[in-house]
Amino acid sequence: MAKLPLARDFPATDETRWKILVEKALKGAPFSLLESKSYDGIAVEPLYSRAADAHVIPGRAPGKPWEVLQRIELGDGKVANAQALDDLNNGASGLALVFQGAVGDYGYGLPPSPAVLNTALEGVHLDWGVPIELQLGVACKEAALMVANLVQMKGVAPSDVNIRFGFDPIGALASNGWSRVVWPDMAPICAAVVVELIEQGFAGPFLVGDGRPVHAAGGSEAQELAFALSTAIGYLRAMEAGGIPRDEARRLIFYRLAADQNQFLTIAKFRALRKLWSRVEESCGLEPETAFVSAETAWRMMTRRDPHGNIVRGTIATLSAALGGADAVTVLPYSTALGLPDAFSRRVARNTQTVLIEESNLYRVADPAAGAGAIETLTDELCAAAWALFQDIEKTGGAAEALRTGQFQREVAKVRGERESAVARRKDSLVGTSDFPYLAEDAVAVLDAAPTPPCDNPGEQSVERLHRMRLAEPFEDLRDRSDAYFAKHGERPKVFLAYLGRPADFNARASFARSLFEAGGIEAIAPEDAQDIESLAKAFKASGAKLACLCSSDKVYASKGAEAAKTLSAAGAQHIYLAGKPGEHEAALKAAGVNDFVSAGADILAVLRQAHANLGL
């Protein structure tokens, strides 16, 4: 393609000139202000040079679209069958069957019942090679053999089906906290089942290294990779001990990772997994081969409030997994956190992938991130961090032993705490929940289906489970209290925003304060324009609020803040906030009646919980 003539009209530039412009924009602030760090401590720079010596990481074949999978997780076989056929007839290329107690059981799962399974897959042409990916729970052996028996009952040759069986007892142990059999004793059972399925003619793969338990518990990218890798190594050893040659055994394992809205780290994570597995293969004396890697959009990023925002998060996650080379992607429908998604929500999930494949053509280039300085650097640093953690796990005795000791769970819990702190301070923003909430949002429909009861724990092995979380939950709890208040009183708890000065003085902090309080379900009431001091008392009383928040510039606070606080206090404000940092006027403002100062970087959840306490919620 010829260069555009327009490009020649601009002078050539370089990093030095870019930094000069950046320093000018920073106005003396340090350049490090533009840097950030991942939860693995990896520095993320604002600009990277091209990685000239980079190579394509072998993954999904160039020009081959990834598989579009749809979750089937409803215990009603007839409804599940209707969903499966609708999905396959309208864009999905395969199905992910989620069984009760599986790592991906987010409240709903298929029971290990032959009757339900047979009904759910009625009319699904397994002999056409429709991809079926099993997410097995604690009854993994029974469920897998049921699927195998169903294939035989339909008269389909096992060699003609495309089923990834997904045995993952270690992942189920991490997710549920218990297992029917301790891992050392489970290993030969897994190997025996795999041998049995191979003898029946199934090609596999049969076992999965799944990083989602770590991701859903708030863990870091390197922790997710290290856990998935160590789990896969455990399965490789089990199969080799069961008589399956190492070269064949490694082909019987696939991977599954979570994809979230952190675009660059997600791309790097999927690329890093392939490099890590290749290193394992080389260490085993094998010529590296391309492993199958499946992706599912992340549970922990899903929100119940403004759930349509999950469509955007899911799109970014899908794009990132696809660019990272995922062979199959499952998108959680946007209403998943609210209940069982309806037909429309499932359709949006399918179309998210269809648009990226058919219209954006993301599948046409092999490893499109190759050579991009940022992605290459993040990939390499993730590999280094994950490999170090993987070695620590292996020194402990492998993933199952690391879970037994509890050390791995403690390390994941540390990162989870850091994430929760970042969310509380809105450093990690959840648009529609912690930032820019909308209190009058309409309800979103989900299917009327009771959640699947949790599996009983008759297990021989119990460990501290990796507790699943969603980042939005603390804010959602506050919104739920607000809803209960609204149902009882017919109105929301309120805060009065007291504008001082000109719009240029109060607009920015008024927007900040509105977003802050409404994230906790406290409706922000404000006059159309700024009020003079004399009118503040009247406007506050008319609002019906018990709380008040001053909103203006530092300059106006210095001249009018104390007087305004006194006026609001005299008018009956039970608690007065000031949007911004007090600076040298803190003592005077507090003496005038200001109780709290709220600003960017503060623990917003703590502020909101105290506000609820002040309101008696």
Image (cartoon, grey):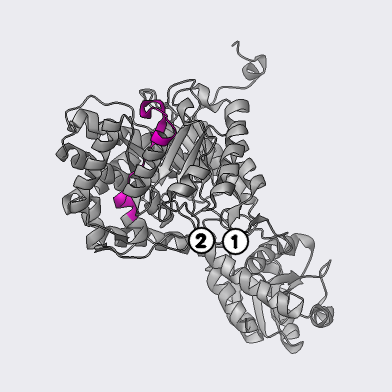
In the picture shown, does residue 336 fall above or below 290?
Answer: below
Query: In the rendering, which numbered label is found on residue 458?
Result: none
Q: Position of residue 109 (x, y in %)?
A: 47, 53
Q: Secondary structure at mark 1?
A: loop
Q: Residue at x 72, y 70 (%)?
A: 523
Residue 485 lies in magenta, yes or no?
Answer: no
Circles 2 and 1: CB distance less than 8 Å?
A: yes
Label 2 neighbourhood size at 10 Å, few (<14), some (14-19), many (20+)? many
Q: Amino acid at mark 1?
A: Ser
Report the residue marked by disc 2.
Answer: 423
What span is colored magenta in the figure?
152-172
Query: In this orientation, which residue lies closer to the viewer: 248 or 295?
Result: 248
Query: Which label's residue is closer to the chain start, 2 or 1?
Result: 2
- Tag count: 2
Q: Residue at x 74, y 83 (%)?
A: 568
Report the residue marked by disc 1.
Answer: 434
Q: From this viewpoint, is residue 582 visible?
A: no
Q: Amino acid at mark 2?
A: Val
Q: Secondary structure at mark 2?
A: helix
Residue 167 lies in magenta, yes or no?
Answer: yes
Q: Position of residue 355 (x, y in %)?
A: 62, 32
- Cα gap from disc 2 to disc 1, whole angstroms: 8 Å
Query: In this orientation, which residue lies closer to the viewer: 614 or 131?
Result: 131
Q: Position of residue 11 (x, y in %)?
A: 59, 22
Q: From this viewpoint, is residue 364 visible?
A: yes
